[in-house]
Amino acid sequence: MDTNFIVIFSYFIVIYRIIQLYEVLIAMSFQNQFTKTTTDANLMETVHHGSAEYPFRYYYENIALFDFKCIDWHWHSELEFIYIESGNVVFDIGTVHFELNEGNGIMINSKILHRLQSSSDAIIPNFLFQPSFIAPQDSLIYKKYINPVISSSLEYLVFQPDIPWQKKALEIIKTIIAVQETEFNREIIVSMSVQQLWILLLENLTFDQFENMGAVISRTRLQLMMQYVHAHYSENITLEDIARTANISKSTALHLFQNNLKLIPVKYLINYRLKQAALLLINTEEKIATISNNTGFNNVDHFCRTFKKAYKMTPTDYRNQERAPVS
């Protein structure tokens, strides 16, 4: 056999093994990450980010690994900073719908309702921290420099690399992300970088970035209706019931859901019922018929058809696939 051929063939084998190893390492980097968003009846995320000793938490996530390639509606008291490492991400924040591409970043304010989704892989290193991570809540710094921002109507800030101050913010965000790979002085570097980032934001915040009161009212009404659906999804509720909880007409309720969630209220109700059913399939031994009835589907055949259409598999197959192995 020709010696050159053997050398070239061996070279390609080495490259192939390196690619395989890279794919394994990428897969491992997403292990132990959350792939489902769990909330309470008020849409508040139930996961605690960080601890009392260190109220900061970093995640390296791929939106494609979440159900429906979506980190669903939720809010939390922490501030959140996200960097789009690769892919495109569609954001729904309050009543605003927009898309961010690779290289952009965003800050989502404390207690702001939001959702992220992508049509394919989207790698989003992100970190969350309590506002008190910057300074103690009873301090002058908190009262003067933190509370005015988190108690305002500001929902989010986008960072784009072609705007000088935002490019600087992105560099700080990437520094905070990069330091997560080391143990040496990590916490103090993160603390200093977060404060540096906050000063940069304060220097560049302007009043025209704060939404008007009408948008705040619309967001509050929408959240009230979503909370009602979450609390009563197992019951036979109607559009009129949903609208009544926000003291608005059925047409206004339809408008708010369609404009902000791109769904009519009934479709949102069905989607939420399906998500609750999926959780029951994974976490309980209840029969399919029981789960159907407990999540508001009065007909088990209709439930199975609807579930299969949404999840591309039957409830039984979903249970078998998603349930964690018993150790």
Image (cartoon, rainbow, N blue to C red):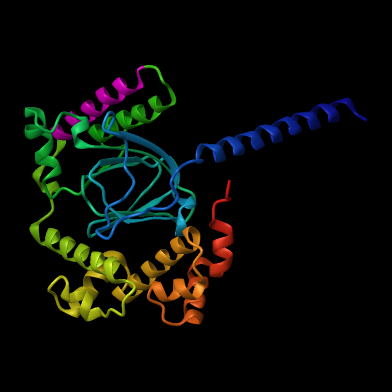
Image position of 317 (left or right of 188): right
Q: Closer to the camera, 228 or 280? A: 280
Q: Closer to the camera, 203 or 293? A: 293
Q: Is residue 91 visible?
A: no
Q: Residue at x 29, y 43 (%)?
A: 106
Image position of 180 (left or right of 135): right
Q: Residue furthest right?
A: 1
315 in relation to 40, above or below: below
Q: Residue at x 16, y 28 (%)?
A: 135
Q: Residue at x 32, y 50 (%)?
A: 46
Magenta highlight: main SS: helix
187 in relation to 303, above or below: above
Q: Closer to the camera, 207 or 230? A: 230
180 in relation to 214, above or below: above
Residue 149: image location, x then y, percent: 13, 41
Which image quadrant is residue 175 in? Answer: top left
Residue 60: image location, x then y, percent: 43, 39
51 in relation to 266, above or below: above
Q: Closer to the camera, 137 or 144? A: 137
Q: Is residue 108 visible?
A: yes
**What's drawn in magenta, residue-wise?**
185-203
Residue 215: image location, x then y, percent: 14, 60
Residue 193 magenta: yes
Numbered disc total: 0
Residue 84: image location, x then y, percent: 39, 42
Q: Residue furthest top?
A: 184
Which image quadrant is residue 201 in? Answer: top left
**In which quadrant will I find the N terminus?**
top right
Image position of 242 (left or right of 215): right
